[in-house]
Amino acid sequence: MRAPGALVALLIAASSISAEQIVSGSVLDAATGQPIAGATVTFAGRAIRTDERGAFQVGGEGDAIGVRASGYRRESLSLHKLADADSAIRLEPFVPKALYLSVYGIQSLALRTPALRLVAETELDALVIDVKGDRGQVSFRSSVPLAAQSGTQAVIAEEPKALFAGLKAQGIYLIARIVVFKDDRLAEARPDLAVKGPGGAPWRDREGLGWSDPFQREVRDYNVDLAVEAASDGFDEIQFDYVRFPDEKDLVFAESNTREARVRAIDGFLAEARQRLVPYNVFLSADVFGYVCWNVDDTGIGQEIESLAPEVDTVSPMLYPSGFQFGIPGYRNPVQHPYEIVYLSLARAKERTGLPGSRFRPWLQAFRDYAYDHRPFGADEIRAQIRGAEAAGSNGWMLWNPHNVYSEEGLEKK
C-alpha cells in the first residue's frame, strides 16, 4: 500500500518486472494535477523528456527510475514498489530559496549555525555549499585522484553523507557549487594544465590566482568527476561556477582562443557533465555573468546564453546590481534600481532563449555595494531583488555574501 502523501506512481508495461522492460507513464503536478511537459525521466542510463501531455516511455534494464522538472522536487523510485501503482508520477512543487556557504562557511560552526537558523525561521529552504571553492579547495575528502595529487583538500570534520543526510532531514535542498576553471591549486600543482601568459608561464588573474585550461581533457574530467562524487553523496543539484574562460586577452590555451572554440568548449563541458550525471537524477545548473543576459556575443568568455541554456536545467545569472558597471538600458545607476536590474535581465534572458522563467534562478546581492555609493544592501534592496525574480517567474533565487554573514533583513518569516 502506498504511504500517505506519496508523490509518484507509474505504469510498468509488462506483466512482471524482468531484466528488460518498457516503462511508461505520465508526469503530473501534485498540486494541480496538470501534466508536466519537458520533465526529465532517467532510466537504465538514459534520459528522456516527457511530451506535451507529460507522457513518457523508456526501455532498458534496471530497477529504479528518476524524475525531475524545474520548479519541483526530484523523485527516485523503485520499480518493484510501483509495479501495481497508477500511471501518474506526481511531483511536488518546490522553489529553492538559498544562502551560500563557502568552503570555510560549511566548516565553521560560527557561520553555519546562524545560516541554518535562518533557514529554519524564514522562507529560505536551500543551501549552496562549496564542494570546490574559488581557490580550487575541495571541501570534503575526495576519492578523485587529481584532488589528492594537487593538494586541494580542505576537509571538514563531518562525514559528508552524514552531514547531508542531517540537512536533508530538515527538508533543505542541497546545491553543490563547483568552481570549474578558476583553479589556483590545480594550476600550481599541474602547470601543464594551467592557462599560460604570452611568455608561456602560468598566468595569474588580478587576485593572483591561476586558472586551468578549459580545453584540456584532464581538467574537464576532473571537475565532472567531482560532480559525480557530489551527486553520489546526496546533493540535489550540481552548480558549476566559473564555467568560463578568463576575461583577459593574449592568453595561451591548448587550442586556438576564438569565440567559436570558446563556446564549443563551455557548451561541450556542460553536455559531458549532463551525460555523466544521468544515473544520479540530479539537477544541473550553471552560473553566468549578469551581462550574458544582454550581450549578443560570448562576452569573450565562452558564455552565450542561447547555446548554454539547453545544456542545463537551470541558468543562474549573477544579477548583483554592483556588478553592472555600465548599467542597463534606461538604468545607469543599478544600485538605485535593484528590482529593475533583476526583473529586466531575466526578461531579456527569457526572450532570447525562449525558455520559461522556471529555467532561471538568479544570484542576488546580499553584500555592501562596492562600485557606486557603497550603500549597504539591507531589507529594502534585498526584497526588491526578490520581487524582481518572482515577477519574472524564476525558479527561486540565491543570496550571495562572500563572508557568509546573513541576516533576516528582506526575508519573510516561515
Image: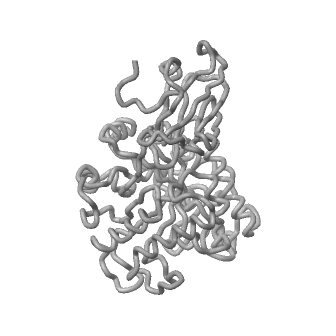
Q: Quadrant of residue 402?
A: bottom left
Residue sitting nearer the eye, 92 or 252: 92
Q: Quadrant of residue 233?
A: top left
Q: Is residue 228 above or below residue 257?
A: above
Q: Is residue 84 above or below residue 333?
A: above
Residue sitting nearer the eye, 2 or 67: 2
Residue drawn at x 60%, y 23% is 62
Q: Is residue 285 left or right of 122 when viewed as pictured?
A: right
Q: Judge whether residue 92 can be spotted in this image.
A: yes
The image shows a total of numbered marks equal to 0
In the rendered view of the protein, which quadrant contains the N terminus? top left
What colour scheme governs how the chains and residues are painted in the rendered image of this protein?
A: one colour
Q: Is residue 30 above or below residue 288?
A: above
Where in the figure is residue 191, as x and y percent of width and height?
62, 59
Residue drawn at x 26%, y 60% is 412
Residue drawn at x 36%, y 24% is 3
Q: Judge whether residue 276 can be spotted in this image.
A: no
Where in the figure is residue 306, as x and y percent of width and height?
65, 63
Residue sitting nearer the eye, 56 or 180: 56
Where in the figure is residue 145, as x and y percent of width and height?
56, 42
- Outermost residue on the top side: it is 16
Q: Is residue 113 above or below residue 351?
A: above
Where in the figure is residue 260, as x and y percent of width and height?
75, 66
Residue drawn at x 69%, y 63% is 263
Residue sitting nearer the eye, 120 or 9: 9
